[in-house]
Amino acid sequence: MNPSRRPAALAGRSPRVASLRRPAQAALAVALLMLGCGPIRVPPLPAQSELIPCTATDCLRLLSWNVHGLPFNRTAGDRLANIAGKIKEQQPDVVVLQEVWTACRAHELARALAPDYVAHERISLPLFRPHGGLLVFVRRGSAWRVEGETFVRYHASGRWYRVCEGDGLGGKGALLLHLRRGAERLGLVTTHLQSQYSEYGHSYECERRRQLNQLQCAIATEFGNSPVLIAGDFNTMPEEALYWSHIAVLGDDLTLPERARCGCGTFTDTDGTRQWIDYVLARNVPADPVADVDVRRLENQAVDDPYSDHDGLLVRVRFDGSRLR
C-alpha cells in the first residue's frame, strides 16, 4: 500500500474496534485476506523483446515489483496473470514481489510461473499469507540459488485497528536472502515500508524512520560488509528528507538515472499523480552504478491496467564476479 491509498473494502470501519484483543485482530485479518482468491491463468500477451539481456557471465537481472495483490480487489487475478506472463517473457534471474498478501495468491503465482521459476516463500500461518506480503522467485535456468533466508518484521507500524489503512494488519518487514552462484555469494533484501495516508493526516514519517533504522541494523547484522542488493517499495519520495537521511545511505541508488531520464514515478494514484517510491540499491557491490547498471520500467497504462498501480523495476547489474567470493 502506498501514499494516499485507501482500500475501498476497508473503508467505513470504526476505530472503536481498538478494544478488541489480538485473537480478534487475527480473525479479522484472516477474514479479509482470504477473500477473493482463485486460480489465475496466464493469457497470451503481445510479445516484447527481452529488455537489457545479460550477454556477459558476471551479470544479474533483478525484477522488483509491487503487484497490488489485495485479495478483495476484483481485478487482482487477471492482473497477476498478466504479471506472471511478463515475468516469463522477460526472464529475470531473480524476482522480488511486494503485496502478495495471501498464501493462495502466492501458490497461484508459483503455478503460473512454473516450470520457469521456483518460489522461496515464508508463510506466517497455514493458508494465510507470505510474511509481509513479500515473495521471491528464482529462475530455474539461472545459476543463482537461494541458500538461506531470514524475515525481520518491523516493530513500528500504523495502528492495526485503522483498518481503512491496512498496514497495521500487514505485518510488514524485510526478507533477507543469501544468493549463491558457484563460489560467488550475494546478499539480497526485499522490503515494503509503512504507507503514507495523507487523506487521514498520517504521513507516518516517524514509523518509516524507525523501520529504516531497523532495516539498516538487520542488513549490517546479516551481511556485514558483504555485497548486497536492496529492493522494494519504500513508500518514500526522493524529495523527502527521509530519503537522503535513511535510504540513500543504505547503498548506491541504481534507479537514479532512470528517474532523472523519465521524470516520472513508479506509483500511480487514482487521481493520476505519479510518485517515485520504489528503489533498488547496491551496497558494497563491485559494480559501477553508471557503467555497469541498466534499469527499465515495466509500465502500466493506468492504475491496475494491465499489471498494477506500480511499475516494475527491471535492473541489470554487471560486476566482477571474483569480488563476490
Image (tube, grey):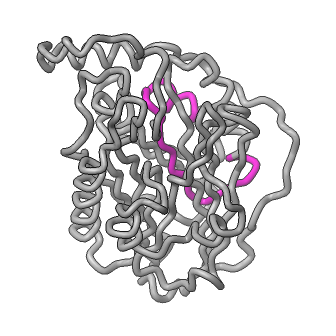
| Residue drawn at the location 47% of the way across and 35% of the way down | 4
Residue 231 in picture, x, y percent from top left: 47, 58
Residue at the extreme right of the image, as rendered: 46
Magenta-drawn segment? 87-109
Q: Is residue 273 above or below residue 191?
A: above
Q: Is residue 88 left or right of residue 154?
A: right
Residue 144 in picture, x, y percent from top left: 53, 64
Say whether residue 112 is visible: no
Q: Is residue 160 left or right of residue 201?
A: left
The one of 257 and 97 positioned closer to us in this rendering? 257
| Residue drawn at the location 14% of the way across and 13% of the way down | 20
Q: Is residue 96 magenta?
A: yes
Q: Is residue 59 above or below residue 262?
A: below
Task: Answer with the quarter of the image where residue 112 lies.
Answer: top right
Q: Is residue 283 above or below residue 142?
A: below
The N terminus, quarter of image: top left
Q: How many marks?
A: 0
Say whether residue 11 is visible: yes
Task: Answer with the quarter of the image where residue 290 lies.
Answer: bottom right
Q: Is residue 133 above or below residue 147?
A: above
| Residue drawn at the location 53% of the way across and 48% of the way down | 137
Residue 11 in picture, x, y percent from top left: 41, 15
Q: Is residue 71 magenta?
A: no
The C terminus, quarter of image: bottom left
